[in-house]
Image (cartoon, grey):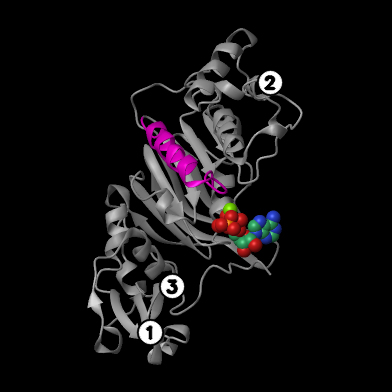
Amino acid sequence: MAAGGWGGGDGLRVVTQGLTRRYGRGVMALDGVNLEIGEGLFGLLGPNGAGKTTLMRILATLLPPTAGRATVGPYDVRRDQHEIRRILGYLPQEFGLYRRLAVGEVLEYVAGLKGIAPGRRRAEVDRVVEITNLGDVRRRPVGALSGGMKRRLGIAQALLGSPRLLIVDEPTAGLDPEERIRFRNLLSELGRGRVVILSTHVVADVESIALRVGVLNRGHLVFSGDPEGLRGLARGLVWELWVPDEHIDRITRPPQSVHPISTRMMPGGAEVRVLSPESPWGEGRPVEPTLEDGYVALVLGFAGDAAAGQRGMGGTPYPQAAGGPAPGGAGGDGGWR
Ligand SMILES: Nc1ncnc2c1ncn2[C@@H]1O[C@H](COP(=O)(O)OP(=O)(O)OP(=O)(O)O)[C@@H](O)[C@H]1O
Ligand SMILES: [Mg+2]
């Protein structure tokens, strides 16, 4: 089922318009999200509870939207579930595995579920085992794999059938640094000729590999554009300063307008990096922001105005949902209580 019924060449696009999802009466998990995602790797960032999994489940046709529209190429997530599933690979955030089956058996089983013809299953499993470097553990029971290998198996099953749309929800959670890097490279390669949507709240995971990034916060899409644009949101807001021991309360109990990003304790004081609209205590040295600074500035509301009117792909302006990120709000609690 290589590319399903999809003619090659034409770029696949995933588009959402006013996409909204409410759970019960209370939680607005997604609120009027307008997004356009083309081929390549799209990094979906956002704190816990921002709505990332909800958006991915809707695109994977596993959850219907409450309002608005989402399309994958010509297909609508409500109407054309079957067609979308034929071109989809999905790695859910919580991936249940068959612990007693061997790696190869799991993959053959999933290949069957995906409708790959029996005669082609073995070759297809060989292919994804090779890509994800699982050859050595092919006969090992899933229950005996390390966390990193399990994540690789998760990716391997998502790759069966060469999906044109690959959705991976927090694929790097729980990986060690080395495995993380390997994963990043693999995903960046997979972005060629297909749409890959990767969610994470670890900015470093998408830092050098995402062509585009989107930031969700409390159900609102607060940024969509290239990583450089996100980084730029913190320009002029990042400072370093030396805080001597006698003023250490400046960072342990900072004023509303100062958000410490990192602190390096040293004899006699601390070297501190902060977000602040102006030079903190008149003592800050301005520094170049990182992508993470841009993300943090946005989610904490430091860059609220700067982010408004950000332009996304194809020059489509993405209207800011009313309110946007709350100034000074801690973000990240997202309603898990
Ligand atoms: N089945 C559900 N029933 C009720 N509320 C839900 C359900 N699933 C998610 N929510 C709520 O919807 C909001 C968005 O959740 P979602 O899982 O999409 O966030 P997320 O960005 O994926 O978070 P995380 O980074 O923790 O995975 C949260 O407030 C969450 O509590
Ligand atoms: Mg999630």
Give the camera-side residue of 125 and 65. 125
Residue lying furthest bottom in this view?
246
Identify the residue under disc 2: 105
Label whose residue precedes the other's in the sequence (3 or 1): 1
Identify the residue under disc 3: 300
Confirm whether residue 76 shows in the render. Answer: yes
Residue 253, position as x, y percentages in the image: 47, 87
Q: Is residue 71 above or below residue 249?
A: above
Boundaries of the magenta span: 170-192
Q: Residues within 10 Å of mark 3 (few under 14, many from 20)?
A: many
Residue 335 part of the magenta segment = no
Give the camera-side residue of 272 and 55. 272
**Distance from mark 3 CB to nearest ligand 1 atom below 8 Å:** no
CA gap between label 1 and label 2 equals 56 Å
Amino acid on which the number 3 mark rests in the picture: Leu
Identify the residue under disc 1: 257
Amino acid on which the number 2 mark rests in the picture: Glu
Residue at the image position 39 percent from the left and 63 percent from the top? 295
Assign a secondary structure to mark 1.
loop
Front tag of 2 and 3: 2
Residue lying furthest right in this view?
100
